[in-house]
Image: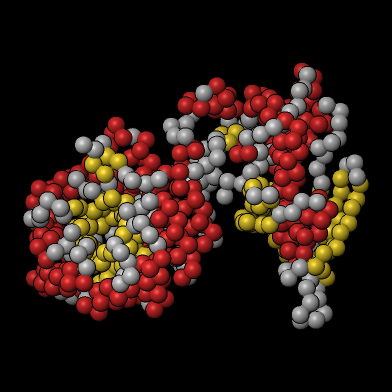
């Protein structure tokens, strides 16, 4: 029978402790709902004794979130344990997670306790937690740097006092996979415990080995792994939930285990966390990064068009992506361009296609990714038409309000090769919002901004009556229109025109998709300027 691994998510505790990832009560509740939809087994909702806000958030999650077991962390002190028990009172399924350092460096410098005192504290505090709750987890903090013999004694003491899960954390991300495998194999043989007490692994990524170490721990006998969405956590982060789960699913032949995770909810959980924290995973992040299922190289695109198994070991739909994305950029070849032309409903003869390919390469060298609206304009010009020409920003001006209760006013002037210059004026609570509203009026597309990613790229210093820094602002924006997300990109020397140009680009993509869907039928949104977040 295939063993099922318990997925213990600590995004709301260890993840939230990391600088830049702090969440308020409402954000924690929203993230907990996403984790419940993901079907994680345990949600570590926070550290009740850390602050009144954390205790309230845990209490709300305990009362309102159904499905997973709700857990609170506690130091090995009766005050912490009582606070955790109180916060978890409303949870139908609850766990108190008690931790205490066991390594020599923790005993000597942080705790100033002898090994005998550590063992006494473990026995007393686990028993105290057990008096509140039948499900108690004990963590031997810095277990990897603890003497193996003392670690066995500490974990055996916790099990004897009533702990049902024995967690072995690599608190500082120091271990290697082989060491983890050997350690867990040794612990499963030597720790005194009943058959229903399981081992858990909690790995940090300081050396980039957290996921590998977690999988090695499973091979060694661990039946729970502690992880976080997007791999957030202290310092370099924790083992990423999505990486562990998809490694187990994709390589079941090698791992021999399974999980209860609904993998189609992975992207929803990742995006929810990104929206709450305003921190997005890197583009090249496994599973959830924007490039995880994107292909630009011509050789790869040709293979994907023939059979996607040539370059993909997972289906993007299985983790919540809409589809694989063939990104048109300077590395793309003729096969991908021909596929996009057919997808958008353009039938190009050899000469027209050659002209389109030459212009595409020129544009790609200039701006990088060439999205749907620009491709439609290129194809239209190659056919001698101008139906798909894009709008561009000519001018944007902001007037500051004179009264404290008045809104900024934006005057935006756009240019279209066929319609010429068109101007609109709009007011909104913010200057940028006013400019966006004016653009929406001109293009007749309703949209709202979901996210803006800005990179300020400094170049060199120049002289203009004194030293000034010459730089470019690169903007990638995601907007929502008619229930779908579209991306826009722009480069400018100033933030405001760069943002407005990116908004125009996103709305042009929305218009192009709508126009060509009506003409051609459904198109591949993932390859058509639709935002991947």
Q: Position of residue 7 (x, y in %)?
A: 32, 51
Q: Position of residue 323 (x, y in %)?
A: 55, 36
Left of 93 or right of it: where is 353? right
Say whether residue 180 is visible: no
Question: Coloured how?
Answer: secondary structure
| Residue 161 x %, y % | 11, 66
Q: Residue at x 60, y 33 (%)?
A: 326
Q: Nearer the viewer, residue 182 or 248?
A: 248
Q: In the image, what residue occupies the spot 54% across and 59% down? A: 275
Is 141 situated left or right of 263 in this image? left
In the depicted structure, whether residue 114 falls above or below residue 294 = below
Residue nearest the observer in this picture, 296 or 512: 512
Work out which quarter of the rendered image holds the N terminus and state it. Answer: top left
Tell me the quarter of the picture where residue 68 sits.
Answer: bottom left
Q: Horizontal placement of 62 versus 276: left or right?
A: left
Above-or-below relation of 157 to 295:
below
């Amino acid at each position: 029978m295939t063993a099922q691994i318990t997925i213990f998510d600590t995004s709301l505790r260890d993840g939230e402790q990391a600088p830049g990832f702090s969440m308020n009560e409402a954000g924690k509740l929203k993230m907990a709902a996403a984790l419940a939809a993901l079907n994680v087994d345990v949600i570590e909702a926070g550290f009740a004794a850390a602050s009144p806000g954390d205790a309230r958030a845990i209490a709300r999650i305990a009362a309102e979130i159904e499905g997973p077991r709700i857990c609170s962390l506690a130091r090995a002190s009766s005050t912490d344990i009582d606070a955790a028990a109180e916060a978890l009172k409303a949870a139908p399924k609850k766990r108190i997670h008690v931790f205490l350092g066991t390594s020599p460096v923790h005993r000597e410098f942080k705790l100033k306790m002898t090994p005998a005192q550590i063992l006494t504290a473990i026995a007393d505090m686990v028993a105290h937690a057990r008096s509140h709750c039948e499900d108690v987890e004990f963590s031997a903090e810095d277990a990897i740097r603890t003497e193996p013999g003392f670690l066995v004694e500490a974990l055996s003491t916790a099990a004897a006092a009533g702990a049902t899960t024995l967690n072995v954390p690599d608190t500082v991300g120091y271990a290697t996979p082989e060491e983890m495998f050997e350690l867990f194999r040794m612990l499963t043989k030597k720790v005194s415990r009943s058959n229903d007490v399981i081992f858990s692994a909690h790995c940090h990524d300081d050396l980039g080995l957290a996921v590998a170490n977690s999988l090695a721990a499973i091979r060694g006998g661990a039946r729970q792994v502690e992880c976080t969405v997007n791999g957030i956590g202290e310092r370099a982060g924790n083992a990423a939930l999505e990486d562990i789960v998809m490694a187990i699913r994709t390589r079941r032949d090698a791992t021999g285990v399974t999980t209860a995770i609904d993998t189609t909810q992975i992207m929803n959980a990742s995006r929810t966390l990104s929206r709450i924290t305003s921190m997005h995973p890197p583009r090249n992040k496994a599973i959830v990064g924007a490039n995880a299922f994107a292909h630009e190289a011509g050789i790869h695109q040709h293979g994907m068009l023939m059979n996607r198994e040539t370059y993909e070991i997972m289906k993007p739909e299985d983790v919540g992506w809409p589809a694989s994305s063939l990104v048109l950029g300077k590395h793309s070849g003729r096969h991908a361009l021909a596929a996009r032309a057919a997808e958008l409903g353009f039938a190009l003869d050899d000469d027209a296609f050659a002209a389109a390919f030459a212009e595409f390469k020129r544009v790609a060298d200039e701006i990088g990714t060439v999205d749907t609206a620009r491709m439609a304009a290129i194809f239209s010009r190659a056919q001698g038409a101008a139906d798909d020409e894009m709008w561009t920003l000519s001018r944007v001006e902001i007037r500051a309000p004179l009264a404290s209760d008045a809104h900024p006013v934006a005057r935006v002037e756009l240019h279209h090769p066929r319609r010429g210059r068109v101007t609109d004026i709009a007011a909104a609570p913010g200057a940028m919002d006013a400019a966006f509203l004016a653009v929406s009026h001109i293009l007749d597309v309703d949209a709202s901004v979901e996210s803006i990613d800005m990179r300020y790229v400094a170049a060199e210093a120049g002289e203009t009556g004194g030293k000034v820094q010459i730089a470019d602002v690169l903007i990638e924006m995601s907007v929502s229109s008619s229930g779908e997300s579209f991306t826009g990109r722009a480069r400018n020397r100033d933030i405001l025109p760069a943002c407005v140009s990116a908004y125009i680009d996103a709305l042009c993509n929305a218009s192009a998709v709508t126009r060509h869907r009506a003409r051609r039928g459904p198109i591949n949104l993932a390859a058509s300027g639709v935002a991947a977040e």
